[in-house]
Amino acid sequence: MSSYRLLGNIEIVGPRGVAPLRTPRHQIVLAMLLVNAGHVVPVGRLVNAVWDGAPPTSARNQIHICISALRRLLKDVGLPDAISTRSPGYLLDAKPGELDLHEFDQHVVSAQTAQLKGESDEAVAYYSKALSLWRGEPFSGIECDAFRAIATNLKERHLTAVEDRIEILLGLGRTQEIVSELLELSAAHPLRERLHVLTMRALCGVGRRAEALNAYHRASHTLIGDIGVEPGPQLQNLYQSILADDRDAQPAAVPAVHPPVCTLPPAPADFTGRQKELGEITGALTGSRGRGHHPPIVTITGMVGSGKTSLAVRAGYELAETFPDGQLYVSLSDGAARARRPAEILARILRFFDLPADRIPDGLDERAETYRALVAPRRVLVILDGAARAEQVAPLLPGGGNSGVIVTSRTRRISLPGHQRVEVGSMEPAEAVEFLGRMAGRDRLRTDPAAARELADLCGRLPLTLRAAGSQLAARPHWTVPQLVTRLADEYSRFDQLGRDGGDVRTALALAYGAMDEQARRLFRRLASLPGREFDTCSAMSVLNVSADQAEDILESLADMYLLTATTANPLRYRYHDLVRLYATERFIVHEPDRRFLDVTPPSVALPQRT
């Protein structure tokens, strides 16, 4: 089996022996391909690596010559197809187990997973396997600026793995075997406080209390003298504990270093308003974090186009300091609004934490357990976008109270234990005009404030459609605001006009319409044929020929999906959002163009009461 080695002198071992890398250029190009194994490396990037940003005019041709030479070397050791040409450059395809850097990362992830499950001995074994792959300085012998930052990163990962392994050994009581190693490490890395903490703990563990105090003084002298900073809280607290000889109050274990994971999409640059809702979200997630054994949960619900996702993402960035170990964004549906299976989503989340594919369990329960184990010691914010039902969310909730969860949904039916609901609807008139101004220019809207307000109203004051209208004005500086108002005033073409620039509410509503049962669809479209803007249970009874209870249940199901809004409680009355009414009218014209449902109870007639 072939072997590509980066963690020390660069080596390639094929079925027929070791490939001789004859020139520094061969080493640099091969190292760049190996660091990016499995990904195409553009020729321009190889040129910059070899010539440090000052290439000759023949550089690209020389790279091609170098690749040809490397292919011959690899062919001679039995690896004829290792390097392939892929536009705009070249790709080296290292299979699992062939590249020592990949093996190192996989062993470290396995060690972290084992430790989270309480399998400390197994974790030590995985860390030992990972560290045994290191044969010296990475990229040893290569003098190239392009690799200095990469080498620094690799050495940091190596040293973190060393510290994590020692941390576990201390917890297992295997102190004697690591004292000498720690003394050497802390001397070699005098500015690394975690090593000093581990060294002092180990010295105390073998009864060398005076040496532990002396180790603190050396560390303090170095930190203050070299970089002008006082020792951190962990060092100082441990020093005071040793001075007091308080052996019953052992210092807390230094937590393993977990690189933060962030998969949030870019924050919307035109985010406007929603300060009340934003305050409710951040307050709920910061005020109750860490209490009890259940993560604080906020559900953001509202109709299509109301900006639920943008609000959740904005909150995610504002809460980054509260959840410093990661902010995960996961879409719970595909592009066609089909719900993704929880097992599929969990596999995706586990890959966010660099868990190798062969370490991801097959079953839903096992994946959920692994996910909770990975997240448990971390402070992570999880955003689950587009939930259709609570059962879809339940396996994706982290355990414990350290992390927080934001769930967005188009239905009020989402109900999770201990959650706080935040509803978003149409924007306030002033906020909607401000939103348009961010897209089209505030001065342009100030020339006709009345038209700007009318434009916002025609968009339903929804971020999705406001963004579409603002984009049209921004792209067409020769248009006036009243001109666009005139175009949108035609109800029969409003969706088409808004859909040209991304405000396709029609498509979003079509997905919601398709998810209803036939009776709900029938009521949804038939109510649009009634006179007036509001309707009641009697209206639904008349157009469907059903009982009062049935009519009210269907009306409430539409209200739960934010396709209707309840305007009064006693008696219950409902209305459409303006854009939803337009879509319902379209559906009525398509499916029942020749029918009218005008024989309904007038609003003044008392409604039958449910018993």
Image (cartoon, grey):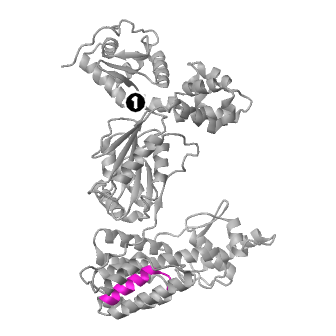
Q: Residue at x 48, y 35 (%)?
A: 306
Q: Residue furthest right?
A: 57
Q: Residue furthest top?
A: 599
Percent position (x, y) of residue 408?
A: 41, 42
Above or below, 265 against 219 in this view is above
Give amino acid for label 1: Tyr
The answer to whether residue 16 shows anywhere in this view is: yes
The answer to whether residue 72 shows anywhere in this view is: no
Q: Residue at x 37, y 51 (%)?
A: 285
Q: Residues within 10 Å of mark 1 (few under 14, many from 20)?
A: many
Which region is colored magenta? 190-204
| Figure quadrant of the C terminus | top left
Q: Which residue is mark 1?
A: 562
Above or below, 185 against 423 in this view is below
Q: Is 193 contained in the magenta span?
A: yes
Q: Residue at x 51, y 28 (%)?
A: 506
Chief SS of the magenta region: helix
SS assignment at label 1: loop
Residue sitting nearer the eye, 448 or 480: 448
Above or below, 211 against 468 in this view is below
Percent position (x, y) of residue 351?
A: 43, 60
Residue 418 relative to residue 150: left or right? left
